[in-house]
Image (cartoon, helix red, strand yellow):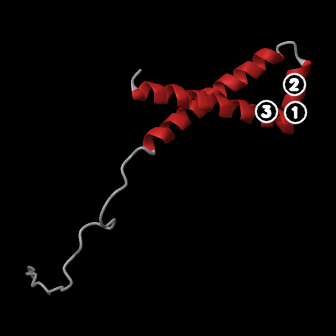
């Protein structure tokens, strides 16, 4: 399996694990009375699965993007552009005084 595909699969798996932790915290803290809504409804398991899956898609995308962007090489040399000469000389500018 190519390294990029393996990286994608592992980062997506981590994203869904993070999503499960996030949904667990949402239910533990009972944010917006979500725990009561899920436990008291007959569609609660479907709602829980949808919350986990949709958040999993978001967290997986963010996790993969972070993994790809952190692979970039660190810049070498000065970070403020090219150095400028130390001396400045005045320049005559001609204008039309009409």
Mark drawn on residue 90: none
Pointers 1 and 2 in contact (C-beta within 8 Å): yes
User: Residue at position x 73%, y 35% from top?
Assistant: 22
Disc 2 element? helix
User: Residue at position x 87%, y 24% from top?
Assistant: 37
User: Residue at position x 34%, y 65% from top?
Assistant: 79
| Location of residue 70 by image quarter | top left
Disc 3 element? helix
Whole-number angstrom distance, CA of label 1 to CA of label 2 = 6 Å
Mark 2 and mark 3 lie on one chain; the one further toward the N terminus is 3
Nearest the viewer among 59 and 74 is 74
Nearest the viewer among 37 and 65 is 65
Relative image position of residue 61 (x, y in whole percent): 53, 32
Relative image position of residue 6 (x, y in whole percent): 47, 26
Nearest the viewer among 38 and 90 is 38
Pick the quarter of the image with the C terminus: bottom left
Q: Callout 1 environment at 10 Å: few (<14), some (14 to 19), or many (20+)?
A: few
Mark drawn on residue 37: 2
Residue holding disc 3: 24
| In the image, residue 59 above or below residue 95 | above
Relative image position of residue 63 (x, y in whole percent): 55, 37
Disc 1 element? helix
Q: Callout 3 environment at 10 Å: few (<14), some (14 to 19), or many (20+)?
A: some
Residue holding disc 1: 33
Relative image position of residue 39 (x, y in whole percent): 89, 21
Pointers 3 and 1 in contact (C-beta within 8 Å): no
User: Residue at position x 42%, y 43% from top?
Assistant: 71
Pick the quarter of the image with the N terminus: top left
Task: Please say whether residue 30 is visible from this viewpoint.
Answer: no
Seen as rendered, the residue at the extreme top is 42
| Location of residue 97 by image quarter | bottom left
């Amino acid at each position: 399996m190519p390294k990029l595909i393996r990286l994608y699969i592992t980062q997506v798996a981590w994203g869904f694990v993070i999503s499960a932790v996030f949904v667990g915290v949402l239910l533990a803290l009972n944010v917006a009375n979500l725990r009561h809504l899920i436990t008291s409804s007959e569609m609660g398991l479907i709602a829980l699965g949808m919350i986990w899956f949709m958040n999993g898609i978001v967290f997986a995308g963010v996790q993969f993007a972070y993994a790809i962007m952190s692979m970039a090489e660190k810049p070498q040399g000065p970070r403020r552009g090219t150095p400028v000469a130390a001396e400045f000389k005045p320049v005559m500018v001609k204008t039309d005084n009409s």
